[in-house]
Image (cartoon, rainbow, N blue to C red):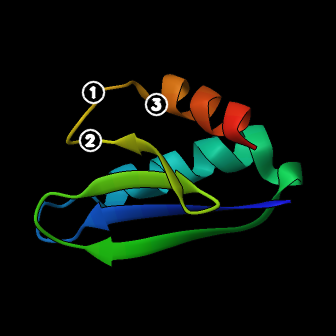
Amino acid sequence: MSTVEIEYCVPCGFRERAIEMSEAILNGCERELDELSLVMGDHGVFRVAVDGETVYDKAEDRAELDEVVRTVRSAL
């Protein structure tokens, strides 16, 4: 079982995007997870990590929601 963390920028208004991402990950991977957490951040951050390893970072990639979910699933 694994842990997923979604860190998002509060001042940028990324909360809805983080919630949408968490719902998509839960819909596709819930049975493989121990925990999914939302972490408030700043400075434009939007990052998804599985067991501490970054699998998506907005600063480096512009992946679509479904692509990020597939990446998370393959990292589990």
The residue carrying mark 1 is 62
Alpha carbon separation for disc pair 1 and 3: 9 Å
How many marks overall? 3
Callouts 1 and 3 close, C-beta under 8 Å: no
Neighbourhood count class around disc 3 (C-alpha, 10 Å): few under 14, some 14–19, many 20 upward:
some
Q: Name the image quarter holding residue 61.
A: top left
Comparing 49 with 17, the one in front is 49
Q: Considering the image in quadrants, where does the C terminus appear?
A: top right
Q: Residue at x 24, y 35 (%)?
A: 60
Mark seen at residue 58: 2
Comparing 22 with 70, the one in front is 70
For the residue marked with disc 2, what is the amino acid? Lys
The residue carrying mark 3 is 65
Left of 15 or right of it: where is 37? right
Mark 2 or 3, nearer chain start: 2
Left of 45 or right of it: where is 12? left
Image location of residue 71, percent across then percent down: 59, 31
For the residue marked with disc 3, what is the amino acid? Leu
Tell me the element at label 2. loop
Q: Name the image quarter holding residue 42.
A: bottom left
For the residue marked with disc 1, what is the amino acid? Arg
Tell me the element at label 1. loop
Alpha carbon separation for disc pair 2 and 1: 6 Å
Tell me the element at label 3. helix
Q: Residue at x 64, y 61 (%)?
A: 51
Image location of residue 63, percent across then percent down: 36, 25
Relative to 69, residue 19 above or below: below
Mark seen at residue 73: none
Q: Viewer-nearest of labels 1 and 3?
A: 1
Q: Residue at x 86, y 51 (%)?
A: 32
Callouts 2 and 3 close, C-beta under 8 Å: no
Callouts 2 and 1 close, C-beta under 8 Å: yes
